[in-house]
């Protein structure tokens, strides 16, 4: 059944694109894309529930379904569904009816590439899938065809492609290192690399990991390779911004985590983890500095993505059951929360006709429901209780204090306080009853408010309740990264109570 669910997941956006090519009409494209997102979401849930602890491969071992990949796909499918609902209201305001079928074709294709990447069992094919996400999303970033959007599209593809080239070099070096153990030619899969890693050249392994970390870290948005992210996230249409932040960044992080597991297989644990922690800390520092002084509303959300990808990097860098569990839980909560935040930012920008936060005033008075949802999301994105990000950040902090990252955990805690103050201060100004805009703000479509509800409610639930099924999957992934046999990991996870409080204090 797992294979069937994977086929449905990939087939839904594929058939949607083909249908939209045959009948390129706006109304038809909207409906078909929405249906594809619903089917993909259902398939992703089924995939997450049926993915075996040890993973299962298909198509001559080129495709793998395991708990880590299924979790990333679930996060992406949630954002795809929410963004597809939001697009029904938002995209119509752009007065681009003739070009909207092309948008939805690209949008569904973008979702397809994001779904495919975590399923790739061959590191080289995974690299191709990640590169395909870049090619497709570049056209979406520049869709509005404004000079700023076109510039952001060019910057995005140049910077990310440069980083991905380094990831390709690292992939080649991993393969070459394997030839000394497995012979001049072999089928390179994640498991084969992991199995051969103890006999590989360790300095070459570390160099290869550094290259893929910088390469895929560029796609993830880790500082200092993040320079493309603020422009691309802020200039693309809001549904695209949500997909870039809530779905694509997690997909690129998969490659880093899988290569990290390869190094753990060679008993290289401390140094790779410390390097990943260092990138996480730098990302938090850069994000805090820019968030405090930010002026553009969507750029504020973009630098928040840099912050949270840094937190995810810290979780995986700290490692262990707590670190991995916190990082994976943070991925889900960030996907929900950042979708909510970009939706609110898109509503504010379209209503006030401005990108600068200084021109957005009295937002809650003009839009009580949308304003309340957006403000709740702002509190949640800063890691405040009782929302999901508080639980995941607390778990990552506990991992740092308990392991190798005491100094990084202290820095993280301090910077989270700085970001909390700076981020909410921007919202204080936007919600303050200041000077009225030159014209009355345009109304917000119900299609643009509904997905905000759909994102906020799970955020609150996941802050108050940590599902035991999540914990078991997180522990399976943690033990897999550490090299513990999958069956033993599953048995241990089933017999151990979660150490993370179900109801944060």
Image (tube, helix red, strand yellow):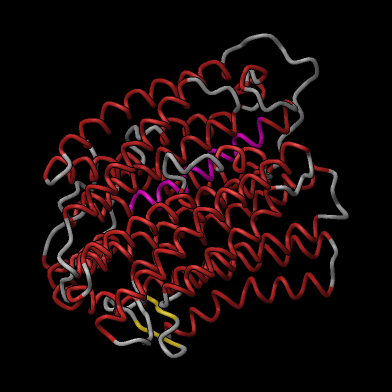
Query: What's drawn in magenta, residue-wise?
Result: 329-348
Q: Is residue 185 above or below residue 375?
A: below
From the top left corner, tell me how far across and down residue 298 is, in percent: 59, 34
Q: Residue furthest top?
A: 435
Does the magenta portion include 341?
yes
Give the left or right position of residue 154, taking residue 494 as reference: right
Q: Residue 479 or 71: which is nearer the viewer?
A: 479
Give the left or right position of residue 31, taking residue 127 as reference: right
From the top left corner, tell me how far across and down residue 61 is, in percent: 40, 86
Q: Residue at x 40, y 57 (%)?
A: 253
From the top left corner, tell me how far across and down residue 251 is, in percent: 46, 60
Q: Residue furthest bottom?
A: 60
Q: Residue 12 or 387: which is nearer the viewer?
A: 12
Give the left or right position of residue 133, taking residue 439 as reference: left
Q: Residue at x 49, y 78 (%)?
A: 6
Q: Residue at x 35, y 44 (%)?
A: 388
Give the left or right position of residue 495, taking residue 176 as reference: left
Q: In this orientation, does residue 73 appear?
A: no
Q: Is most of the magenta stretch helix, strand or loop?
A: helix
Q: Residue 214 or 14: which is nearer the viewer?
A: 214
């Amino acid at each position: 059944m797992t294979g069937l669910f994977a086929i449905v997941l990939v087939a839904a956006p594929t058939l949607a694109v083909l249908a939209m090519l045959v009948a390129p009409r706006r109304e038809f494209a909207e409906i078909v894309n929405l249906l594809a997102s619903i089917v993909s979401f259902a398939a992703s849930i089924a995939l997450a529930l049926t993915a075996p602890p040890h993973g299962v491969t298909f198509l001559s071992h080129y495709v793998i379904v395991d708990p880590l990949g299924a979790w990333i796909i679930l996060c992406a499918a949630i954002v795809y569904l929410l963004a597809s609902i939001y697009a029904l209201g938002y995209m119509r305001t752009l007065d681009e009816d003739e070009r909207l079928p092309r948008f939805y074709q690209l949008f569904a294709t973008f979702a397809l590439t994001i779904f495919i990447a975590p399923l790739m069992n061959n590191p080289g094919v995974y690299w191709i899938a990640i590169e395909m996400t870049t090619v497709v999303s570049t056209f979406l970033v520049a869709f509005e065809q404004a000079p700023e959007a076109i510039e952001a599209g060019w910057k995005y593809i140049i910077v990310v492609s440069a980083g991905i080239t380094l990831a390709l070099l690292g992939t080649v070096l991993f393969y070459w290192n394997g030839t000394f153990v497995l012979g001049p030619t072999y089928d390179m899969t994640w498991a084969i690399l992991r199995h051969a890693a103890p006999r590989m050249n360790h300095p070459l392994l570390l160099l290869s990991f550094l290259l893929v970390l910088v390469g895929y870290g560029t796609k993830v948005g880790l500082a200092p390779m993040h320079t493309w992210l603020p422009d691309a996230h802020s200039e693309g249409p809001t549904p695209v911004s949500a997909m870039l932040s809530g779905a694509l960044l997690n997909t690129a992080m998969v490659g880093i985590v899988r290569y990290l597991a390869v190094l753990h297989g060679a008993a290289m644990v401390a140094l790779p983890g410390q390097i990943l922690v260092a990138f996480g800390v730098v990302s938090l520092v850069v994000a805090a500095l820019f968030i405090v002084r930010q002026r553009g509303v969507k750029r504020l959300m973009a630098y928040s993505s840099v912050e949270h990808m840094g937190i995810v990097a810290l979780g995986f860098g700290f490692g262990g059951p707590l670190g991995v569990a916190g990082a994976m839980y943070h991925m889900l909560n960030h996907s929900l929360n950042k979708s909510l935040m970009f939706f609110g930012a898109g509503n504010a920008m379209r209503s006030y006709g401005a990108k600068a936060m200084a021109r957005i005033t009295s937002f809650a008075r003009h839009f009580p429901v949308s304003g309340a949802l957006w403000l709740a999301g702002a509190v949640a994105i800063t890691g405040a209780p009782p929302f999901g990000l508080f639980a995941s950040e607390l778990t990552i902090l506990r991992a740092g204090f308990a392991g190798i990252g005491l100094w990084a955990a202290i820095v993280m805690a301090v910077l989270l306080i700085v970001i909390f103050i700076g981020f909410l201060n921007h919202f204080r100004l936007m919600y303050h009853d200041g000077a009225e805009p030159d014209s009355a703000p345009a109304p917000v479509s119900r299609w643009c408010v509904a997905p905000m509800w759909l994102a906020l409610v799970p955020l609150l639930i996941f802050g108050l309740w940590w599902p035991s099924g999540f914990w078991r999957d997180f522990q399976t992934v943690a033990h897999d990264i550490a090299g513990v046999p999958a069956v033993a990991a599953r048995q241990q996870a089933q017999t151990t109570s979660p150490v993370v409080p179900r109801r944060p204090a």
